[in-house]
Each structure stands twice: as structure tokens, then as C-alpha cells.
Image (tube, rainbow, N blue to C red):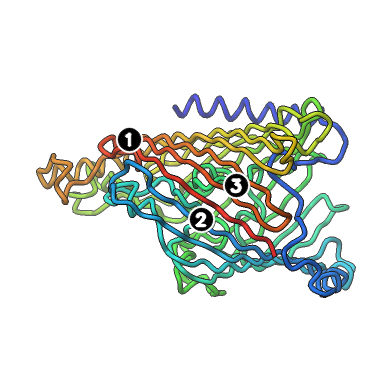
Amino acid sequence: MMIITAKVTLISSALFLSLSVNAAQKVWNGTALGFEAPQPGLLGDMLGIRPLLNEQGFNWNLGWLSQLAWNAGGGYDHDSHMAYIDQVALTFNQDLERWTGIPDARIEGNIVNRNHNDNLTTKRLQDRRVNFNDLSQESWGGQSITRLGWLTFARSFDERRLTWRIGMMNKVQTFDQIIPCDFQLLSQCGGKSANSMTWNNWNVHTWGTTFEYKLTPELTLKTGVMEQNPQASSRSHAWSWSTKGSKGILLPVELEARTSMNGLPGAYNFGVLFTNAPQTDLYSGKSGGAGAVDPEGYREYNRTWFMYAGFNQQITRHKEDANRGMSVATSLSVADQRSNYMHYTAAAQMRYRGLFDARPEDWLGLGVTYIAMGSHYARGQAYQNQLQGIDDYGNARYSPVPGHSVNADLYYRFWLSSWVELQPDLQYWHRPGGLKETQDAWVVGLKTVVTF
């Protein structure tokens, strides 16, 4: 599998490098790929306050999101449950160039309030005795809490080809941003870089600095140095400036192309992530054999790798409207399965914006994900059963042995106005948590987005 994956990523890299060289020199428009421009919010111009702030270089977006998920059938626990979570997110940007003359100088910030720690996946869909590998509500974050997502300073150099960012940051500001997070199923939300388990999505910050350099107008090289801190998602770190708990550094390198093929926009990326933070093997012991019985404990090592790649390409245009049409996307991740319980994940998606002439702003989306659990994690689970002499899955002390799972998500998003959208979805879970013993599950969901 590793050889096949390497060939796929090399071919993908060569493809988007070729595309970038031959791309049309017009403005890149990713609307049909899921990257829509901000729309007027519920509060409008706030009696002239918003335009006044914009004139001073302060731009902001305030949004509310909720996600409902109901287990319609199957799963580990068949008892009916309607799980609900929501969040309020403020993202802002203060332009400093007008005051300092520094090219593209700005302060960037993000604050997120999450509520209702209600997770349908662990409550009903899968066996809690194994780690979850997907979520029916992608915005579930494990806590009801208000957190600082990021607070950074950024500026440009070399005639705006080089962008430098520094501060308390999150990876989503720079890396793996070619696929939007529109599905409610986590494995269909954006790219797969979060599967490394060494950094976090969205509302968790760590210290770092990143660089983006435009090799050509379409091709960008990204890199940086970021703190690797397992405690970053803890409650005590929500507003902390401290590096307490840091274990090492992260070194990401990504190549991204935003180009056009046959006049239609596309985005392609390939990234590698290294860390020197100590990692614990999920099976092997320091003296050989199983770590569960090794007198020296589990094996540890200081170098871990992770790879991710993907593309998002518009393939049809609805009549003469560039903002309507079909796009297809694929994302992939491969991890070091010695310490990561998810070995590889592959997701494929189709989106259509404006399928019906009467509703040109609506979206239709369909996605399927294949998740393969790591062999070291599975061997560790099996060895625990061997030690205890248990082979009965129904025994509470049994450690289930995961394999692979396949999940799918179908949604239709109703654009009701510029400030509110409703998105019902239907999810199918095959072997939840990677367990063949768990019945396949159906989930009905509803996502609501309100922009202020």
C-alpha cells in the first residue's frame, strides 16, 4: 500500500506542477470549488459601524453553527439519541499597512465558543473500547469552552511573493486549504492533515512561524516551524501564552497549486510533516516483543513522519455562469502506524453548486471515505486479549481489534438568504470504528449556519 500511495502522490505532484505551468493568467475563482466570497450578514452595516471599521482596516466575520445528528438505525448502541452541538466563531483581521507602510502587515485573530458536549459517535455509533476514527458532527471538540484559535502577525516581502506569519497560530491559517469543510462528517471536512495527531484543527493554538513563497503566480511553497504540544487542546491552554507541555517541534512542508484546466479552476497540494517530539509505539516494547509485557515498557522514538495530498477540481460549468457547476475532490493521508492508530485515510467527494435554475445558490454534496486502522494498534489490542485469555467480544474486558471502515455522507444545502443556510444530510457508517462486529449505521443530520 505504501508503494502504491507513493506512486499516486508522485503522479499527483507532477500533474499539478504541469497544470500550474500551463494555467491561464486570469483571476482564480474557487466559488464552484466551495470557496464562496463572504456574503452580507444578518446585522447588515450595523447602522454604519461596520463600514466605519472597514475604513480603519478592521474586518471581521461572526458566525453561528449548529449540528444535529440522530442515529436512525444500526450502530453499537441502538437506543435512539438526538445529539446537538453548536459554536460561535469570531474571525478578524486588522490591516496595519495603512498605519505602518509595511507591505500586507496585519494582525489576525480567531475566537471560538463551543457548547453542548454531545457526541453521537461515541454515545451510539461505535464501540467505546476503540479509538474513534470519524465523527458524525465534525465541529465536536470534546469540550464546552471558549478558546483562542489564533492571534498572529503577518506581513509580506519580495514584492508580496513571500508571506511571513508568527505568533500563536493554527495550521488552518497556512496549510492544507484546498478543500472546504462543508460536510458534517469529519472525514469529509477539508483535507486530511489533522490525522497526523500531532497538531490540531481550527480553534486550538500553539506557537510557531510559517512562510509562504509564490514560486509562480499559481504555485506556492509553504513551510514553517511550529510547537508540538499534546496539551494544546486542554482546557488550561485555552487562552494560555505558555509553552508548558511542549514536546518538540513540527516541520511542515507543502506545495500548493491553484490553477485552471480547460478554463476551470482547480487546487492541488502535497504535504509532508515531520516532528522530533517523542512518540510511543502502540505495540512494540523496548526490548523487542510486546510492550505490554516488556519490563522496559513501550518503545519510544523521536522522529515521526506524516504525509497528505489532495486535489479539488471543477469539471463542469453550468451554461455561462462560472459560479455554478460540478467539482470533484480527493484527499489522502498516510501516517506512521507505529504511533498513529489510523494508518491511512482516503476520501472522494463530488459537489454541485446551482444544480437547479430556480435555486442557483444551493449545494449538493456526496462523499465517501475509506479508513484503515494501523497494524500496531490492532496488534496491541489483540495482545491485550491474549494476556487476559479473553476471546469473547461480548466480554466487557475484551479489547476489540479494528480493521477498516467506510463512511459516506450525502447533503443538500438550502441557501435561504445571504445570512442563513440549512443543510440536512444522510450518513452511512460501514463497520463503525473499524469493527466488523458493529452493525452498520445510518445517521440523519442537520447543519445550520447563520452569518452576522
Residue under label 3: 182
When the figure is inspected, residue 213 is found, relative to residue 147, above or below; the finding is above
Circles 3 and 2: CB distance less than 8 Å? no
**What is the x, y in percent for residue 22?**
82, 27
The Cα atoms of the two marked residues, 3 and 2, are separated by: 12 Å
Q: Determine the secondary structure under disc 3.
A: loop
Q: Amino acid at mark 3?
A: Asp
* In front of the other: 251 or 97: 97
The Cα atoms of the two marked residues, 3 and 1, are separated by: 27 Å
Residue under label 1: 403
Residue at 13% x, 45% y is 387
Q: Is residue 66 left or right of residue 172?
A: left
Residue under label 2: 67
Residue 273 in view in this figure: no
Quadrant in the picture for residue 270: top right
**What is the x, y in percent for residue 17?**
72, 30
Image quarter hosting the C terminus: bottom right
Q: Amino acid at mark 2?
A: Gln
